[in-house]
Each structure stands twice: as C-alpha cells, then as structure tokens.
Image: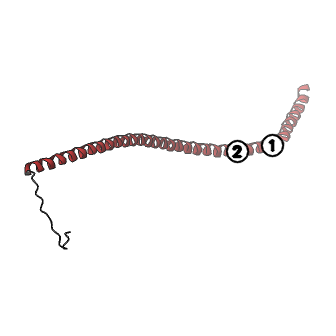
Amino acid sequence: MSPEGTSIQTPITVTYSLGEVLKEINSKLDKMDEKFEAKFEKSEAKFEKFEAKFEKSEAKFEAKFDSIQKDITEIKMGQIRLEEEVKTIKEDVTEMKSIQRNLVNDVADLKGAKSLITPLIVSVVTAFLTLLFRLVPNFSQ
C-alpha cells in the first residue's frame, strides 16, 4: 500500500511464447502419463499375480472338494453294502432261531419217544419170546 492509502498495482508482463508454455504443459502431462502408466502396470502385475494365486487356490480347493465327494460316495456305497449285510445276517439269525426251535422240539419229541420205545421194545421182545416158547414145544412133538 502506498502512504496515501490507496493501493497501486504494477502490471506485470510475461514474455513467454504460447508454444513454449504448451510444450512445457505437454511435457508435464507426458511425465504424469508415464507415472500413471508405471503405477497402472505395477497394479496390473499385482492383480495378475493375485489372480494366479487365486486360480491355484481354486484348483486346489476343487481337487480337495472332488476328493471329499468321492470319499463321501464311497462311504455311502459302503454303508449300503453294510446295510445289506446286516439285513442278510438278521435273516440268517431268524432262520437259525427257527431251526433251533425245531431242533429243540425234535429233541423233546425224541425224549418223549424214548419213554415209548422202551415199553415197545419190551413188548416186542415179550411177544417174540412168547411166540418162541409156543413154537418150541411144537418142535418136540
């Protein structure tokens, strides 16, 4: 400010040519573009690296998942076979129980028949001896 209280501005003249200014701006834009390209390429390389790791992890996951599915299928098939074998065993046990029941009844019948066989044998022997004694006196005559 001037001592009188008014401000005086002095005009400034710039003597740059428009071509030089545009050239300087273009140069700065090129530098910024190069920096941007470098950062973009760096980011793109990181992204590709990440994508490769992700694909590798995905492949491992799919392989493990397929393996687990295969194991589950085998377990289910084994379970079905076991269920069939258990069913067969149950049928065999039922059949064995039936056979055992029949054998127990047959043994009981034999024990009952044993008590009948002794008197039957005694009766047959007695009848045979009686017949023999009756025939023997007839031979002597």
Q: Check disc 1 and report its element: helix, strand or loop.
A: helix
Residue 119 lies, in percent from the top left, at 85, 41
Tags 1 and 2 touching, CB below 8 Å = no
Instruction: Residue at 74% x, 46% y: name it.
Output: 105
Residue drawn at x 78%, y 42% is 110
Side (left or right) of 92 relative to 128:
left
Residue 52's disc number = none
Disc number lying in front (1 or 2): 2
Furthest residue toward front: 3
Where is residue 88? Give x, y as percent: 58, 43
Inspect the image, locate mark 1, and give the three-letter code of the amino acid beneath it.
Lys
The spot of residue 30 in percent (x, y) is: 18, 45
Left or right of 16? Residue 138 is right
Instruction: Rate crowding at label 1 as few (under 14), some (14 to 19) or many (20 or more) other CA atoms within 10 Å.
Output: few
Pointer 1 or 2: first along the chain: 2
Residue type for callout 2: Asn
Query: Which mark, residue 102?
Result: 2
**The one of 139 and 119 positioned closer to us in this rendering:** 119
Q: Which residue is mark 1?
A: 111
- Inter-mark Cα distance, 1 to 2: 14 Å
